[in-house]
């Protein structure tokens, strides 16, 4: 494994640093990369690693750099602006590609390159972090336990908090509204509606339909044509979401307003600290059902999202080097529904005591 070369782009971001530290902890020596020398150099010096500085807009130079690596780990987001040039460079260079996006359109874009990835003999795998490894694995786990499933529901609850990068990405996606998949198509769902109570491993939570990456990836990995993804919210936010949701979508559709909000987020949000990353928990509930009324449910209890992302991300890199999957794949398609159980501190349940 040590002879494999890989580069982490966006290495200096909140999540990029966690991925770099996990890689070093596991004995890897990735090359650190990003667009800002003043941020990349001190990190490379601290971790004793080499570095390269390149702008994603400089596609010629990017392609020359990428061809020299076995794999690129892309950690720079919002991915709607960063993923496409790196995917193009990886296909050109015959270099494996992974990223940690949870953005539906980006996941769809990566999956659309399946044929080119197969022709080049490489893996293109978006979503090797908390979005979407646990939900992709749970979707495939419940789907396999129901004959001809036609409905899939996935819900996520966490006790952690988001990084600035995640908040900025959510703001970027906000104008697209809330999406669900119906009869194979992505369609809009009225934001703030459809709230319900779901029992997770820890307790019951109130959830609302929210666009989650599985609207793209679970459709690809399970083939189920009707998918709803939910996120837990404090009950008191629900009435507010019904009118603030659509209002903020219209406001955030105006680019300068979005940029202003993102600047505020950069100043005010710092991401979970070490204590929270070690102690917070994340929960997933999944249900698949068919036309005959058969259904399967399962529950997952795992670690805090950013902690999970660093470990799962490096784990997927190691599996790509070992198993050499080819094509544009989801994590569960490449490594199976039990992939998530390889991440320390993760437990899956087929039933809860009171279900
Ligand atoms: N799916 C998941 O589970 C999961 C988990 C964690 C993070 N994420 C996603 O990962 C992304 C990064 O999150 P974060 O918390 O690390 O954010 P962050 O701290 O804001 O870091 C963002 C990184 O991306 C770089 N970047 C942003 N736009 C760029 C561009 N146009 N060209 C080149 N580099 C660019 C930044 O470089 P500069 O510092 O030079 O600006 C920085 O290195 C977000 O989209 C977030 O949603 C997803």
Image: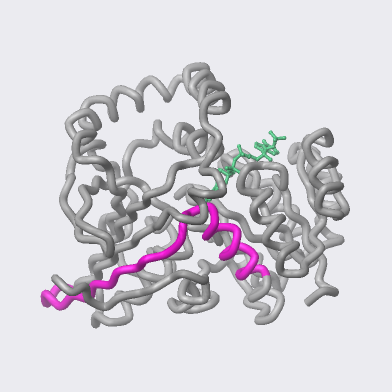
Above or below, 293 against 197 in this view is below
Q: Nearer the viewer, residue 236 or 322?
A: 236
Q: Ligand 1 lies in which image quarter?
A: top right
Residue 113 in the figure: left or right of residue 143 = right
Residue at image position (40%, 33%) is: 174
Dividing the picture into quarters, in which one does residue 227 lie? bottom left
Q: Give the tally of numbered discs.
A: 0
Residue at image position (70%, 45%) is: 10
Residue 184 in the figure: left or right of residue 134 = left
- Residue 335 % position (x, y): 53, 77
Q: Nearer the viewer, residue 175 or 36?
A: 36
- Residue 331 % position (x, y): 52, 69
> Over which residues does the magenta segment extend?
290-317
Asked whether 175 falls inside the magenta stretch, the response is no
Residue at image position (24%, 80%) is: 146
Residue at image position (16%, 49%) is: 196
Q: Nearer the viewer, residue 287 or 185?
A: 287
Q: Which residue is at the far front?
A: 275
């Amino acid at each position: 494994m040590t002879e494999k070369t890989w580069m982490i782009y966006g290495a200096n971001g909140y999540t990029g640093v966690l991925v770099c530290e996990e890689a070093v902890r596991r004995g890897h020596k990735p090359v650190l990369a990003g667009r800002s020398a003043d941020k990349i150099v001190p990190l490379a010096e601290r971790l004793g690693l080499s570095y390269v500085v390149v702008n994603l807009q400089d596609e010629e130079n990017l392609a020359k750099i990428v061809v020299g690596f076995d794999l690129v780990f892309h950690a720079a987001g919002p991915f709607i602006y960063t993923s496409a040039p790196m995917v193009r460079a990886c296909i050109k260079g015959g270099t494996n590609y992974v990223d940690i996006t949870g953005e539906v359109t980006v996941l769809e874009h990566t999956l659309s390159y399946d044929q080119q990835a197969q022709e080049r003999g490489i893996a293109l795998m978006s979503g090797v972090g908390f979005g979407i490894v646990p939900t992709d694995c749970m979707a495939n786990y419940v789907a396999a336990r129901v004959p001809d499933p036609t409905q899939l529901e996935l819900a996520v609850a966490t006790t952690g908090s988001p990084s600035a990068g995640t908040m900025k990405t959510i703001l970027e996606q906000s104008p697209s509204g809330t999406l669900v998949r119906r009869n194979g198509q992505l369609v809009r769902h009225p934001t703030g509606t459809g709230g319900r109570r779901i029992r997770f491993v820890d307790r019951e939570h109130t959830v609302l339909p929210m666009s989650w990456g599985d609207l793209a990836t679970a459709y690809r990995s399970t083939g189920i044509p009707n998918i709803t993804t939910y996120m837990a919210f404090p009950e008191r936010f629900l009435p507010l979401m019904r009118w603030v949701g659509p209002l903020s979508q219209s406001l955030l559709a105006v680019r300068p307003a979005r940029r202003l909000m993102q600047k505020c987020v950069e100043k005010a949000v710092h991401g979970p600290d070490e204590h929270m990353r070690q102690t917070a928990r994340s929960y997933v509930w999944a249900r698949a059902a068919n036309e005959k009324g058969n259904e399967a449910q399962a529950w997952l209890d795992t670690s805090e999202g950013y902690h999970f992302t660093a470990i799962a991300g490096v784990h997927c890199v190691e599996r790509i080097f070992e198993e050499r999957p080819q094509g544009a794949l989801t994590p569960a398609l490449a490594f199976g529904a039990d992939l998530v159980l390889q991440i320390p501190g993760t437990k899956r349940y087929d039933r809860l005591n009171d279900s």
